[in-house]
Amino acid sequence: MALEEYQRKRRFSETPEPEGKVESKSTHRFVVQKHRASHLHYDFRLELDGVLKSWAVPRGPSLDPADKRLAMEVEDHPVSYFDFEGNIPQGNYGAGSVMVWDVGTWQPLSSVQVEGKYVPASDEEARAMLAKGDLKFRLKGKRLNGDFALVKMKGRRPGSKGNEWLMIKKHDQHEVEDYNIDHYDSSVLSKRSMDEIAGDEGSREWNSSRPASRGKLKAAWLADAVAKFDQQKAAQRADGGKKSAKKSAPAKAVGKKTTETHKTASRSSSKEKKTLKRA
Ligand code: MN
């Protein structure tokens, strides 16, 4: 199964990340997660065939076509990962802070141009382009927009795993010369900076920096994700970070671990953990 490697690498009793499953239906969402692990990088993920195809981009995506950004193909992630933001505890795979840096939708593009423009392609063509190592696509995000290519590097460097791709912005009206990703250190989900996320142990401290409104969210699925996020935070604040596992249970399917369940559990005794798990 497509998520075996993802699940093998993680201990879900310790990490707040979703265990997830291969979804039977796919839409075309994408997410970029800023990940401050042993090395800061950005994870670029495209929803296809019930999973998130994933690449770790050390310098992050760029809107400048002059930049060719190394993108290391990594294991498929569950679709439920797309709104994961929080802290992976020390000692776990990918330990560190994760920010939802951009979200939106994507569209595979045919390599055939019509009147100088790329035209939409089918999922079948997307699979073929991925297998071939030359995927063209269009992003419609809050920060990343326009046409891109992910191109697999053919010449293997000594010691490379053969998972090296380049992420390149195509020329269009969305290109930005000298694009500097460091200027955008905030979550599109919570507006928090990386430091705020990192310092957000039980979410109790996090209150003051939050704006009153996020503005209108056009995409319903994004609005849902934000609403869910707000609910969890509200429950945590109301409970002071305790007993929130019970309250949040209806928000997610039975058997799934919520972020706050984990966070609460990680600060509790093992006796309390058992209680929470039953709850
Ligand atoms: Mn990562």
Image (spheres, rainbow, N blue to C red):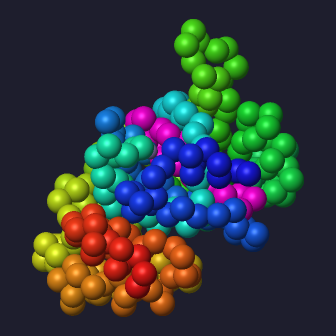
- Specify whether residue 57 is painted magenta: yes
Left or right: 160 in relation to 231: right
At a point 37% along the width and 88% down the height, the residue shown is: 246
At a point 34% along the width and 80% down the height, the residue shown is: 275
At a point 30% along the width and 52% down the height, the residue shown is: 89
Q: State the image coordinates of residue 216 (x, y, percent, origin top left).
A: 42, 84
Q: State the image coordinates of residue 115 (x, y, percent, origin top left).
A: 81, 50
In this view, which residue lies farthest toward the top?
A: 158
The magenta region covers 43-64
* Res 139 quadrant in image: bottom right
From this view, report whether residue 185 is shown above or below residue 69.
below
Q: State the image coordinates of residue 203 (x, y, percent, origin top left).
A: 22, 72
Of residue 245 and residue 64, the one placed in the foreground of this image is: 245
Left or right: 193 in relation to 16: left
Of residue 54 and residue 133, the one placed in the foreground of this image is: 54
From this view, report whether residue 92 is shown above or below residue 104.
above
From this view, report whether residue 109 is shown above or below residue 56.
below
